Image: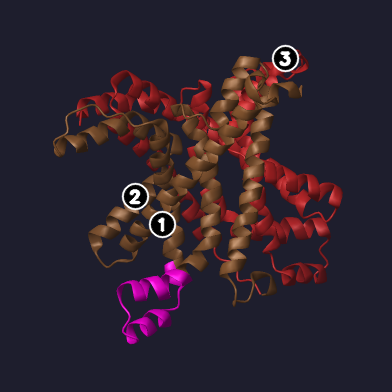
Amino acid sequence: MRFELMYESFFKIIEGIPLTLQVVSISTVLGLALAIIVALMRISGRKSMSIPAYYFVYLIRGTPLLLQLYFVYYGLGQFSFIREGILWPILKEPYWCGIITLTISTGAYSSEIIRGGILSVSKNFIEASGALGLNKIKTFLLITLPITVRQALPAYGNELILMVKASSLISIITLMEITGIARTIISKTYAPVEIFLVAGSIYLIINFIIVLAVWLAERKLGTVKAN
Amino acid sequence: MFEVFAFGSSGWGDEMLMGALMTVLVSASSLLLGILIGIIFAACKLSNIFILKIIANTYTTIIRGIPELLVIYLLFFGGSGAVMYIAKIFGYDGYIELNAFTIGTIAVGAISGAYSTEVIRGAVNSVHKGQFEAGKTLGLNGYGFYGRVIFPQVARIALPGIGNVWQITLKDTALISVTGLVEIMRQSRIAAGSTHEPFIFYTAAIILYLVITRLSNILFDKAENTYSKGFVSKGAL
């Protein structure tokens, strides 16, 4: 073990934390919005809505994230209409390609979590709310949504951890976040074990904080006694 | 547009299919290695020996909390060194280099092993306690007990979970393309670079992955039905 090297590389690697957190949080927020839309489309009961949503989720869950990233970063740039289009200033940046890909990916996975949460809301609650004279929108906002949030929270916590892990892939398209810096140091110093321990611990700490935050949120929201 | 997928030396059709075959091969060997690791660590987690529990819990926590890419870098850059270190203990002093397939299998196998551990542990836990007691009462031990009583039940319960692990493993093998193993990802990168048609080749790669996913879903469903004979099917409940 070269402890001095570990100490030095620690300070280099933590410089990647802001980028990791930035990419994860932007894509999580955008992805959540996408996930809600996709989940509502899937349970809408209209085939013109639910079938595209189903195939979107199927496509994203059936292919590796790295491939999706390559597709967005390298694949789309092949066409001149994209290169000359208004979105090109965004699509030529690896940063935005990373965010777009992670947003789409987490959108697909989270939509399943949200769908499960919405479907788990007992019919009794909906009927009770109707009996109290609440209309459909109020029922959704005041009854379905809070219960869904509570039910979906544990699974969504897992999704957040998966997002932190997935964000390491953007290092392959030249972004220098935690894994990217770690890889550079490994190939310079050839000390894979030491750097792995440093970078790995940083990821474990980030994920531990997420687990803790989700656990606290779960406790604060209490349990839903359905049926 | 489709001439780039011609077979033989004029197109990339056969190369892409070979890449798909390589993906399936490395995924299958990683899954098997992962199941082996899973059985060992599930046994550790279920044992009453404190130190074994700690080791198994540390392993699953690390793998589930650290990006797969980092694990792959660790083994890609450190794998040969570790093997040479062990060989040195046994008196071999030469240079050993592991090929990309072996490193890929070990790396993805180690990742998939953590998920398999949880699946197998859950399956063993859900075998009814009476089955263990009955087996012991009948005086069964060793193969008779584990092989004939416990394993068939664990296998049946674990199968859907292993199906999920297979899907994860299949997608994780895309990451070992960074180590140079020519599977779907790497092959489509090479083809995209050489023909300047990245869109077409990445689309082809997406289709190949979806086909493999679909086919393996069908196989796992069949296996589930076979092993669930005599049980009430999930749909009927």
Mark identifier at residue A83: 3
Question: Up-down: is A126 above or below B171?
Answer: below
Both on one chain, marks 3 and 1? no
Secondary structure beneath dot 1 equals: helix
Nearer to the camera, B121 or B96: B96
Residue B84 seen from this side = yes
Magenta stretch containing residue B143, yes or no?
A: yes
Question: Between marks 1 and 2, how big is the CA–CA gap?
Answer: 10 Å
Secondary structure beneath dot 3 equals: helix
Q: Crowdedness of circle 1 by 10 Å Cα count: few (<14), some, many (20+)?
A: many
Magenta stretch containing residue A201, yes or no?
A: no
Indicate the chain coloured red by its letter: A
Residue A107 seen from this side = no
At x 69%, y 30%, the residue is B203
Q: On the rendered image, what quadrant is the N terminus of chain B found in?
A: top right
Question: Between marks 3 and 1, how big is the CA–CA gap?
Answer: 47 Å
| Residue type of the residue flagged with mark 3 | Arg
At x 34%, y 32%, the residue is B98
Nearer to the camera, B135 or A116: B135
Indicate the chain coloured brown by its letter: B
- Span of residues in magenta: B124-153
State the image coordinates of residue B94 (x, y, percent, origin top left). Answer: 20, 27
| Residue type of the residue flagged with mark 1 | Thr
| Chief secondary structure of the magenta portion | helix
Q: Which residue in the protein does label 2 denote?
A: B59
Q: Which residue in the protein does label 1 denote?
A: B117
- Pointer 2 chain: B
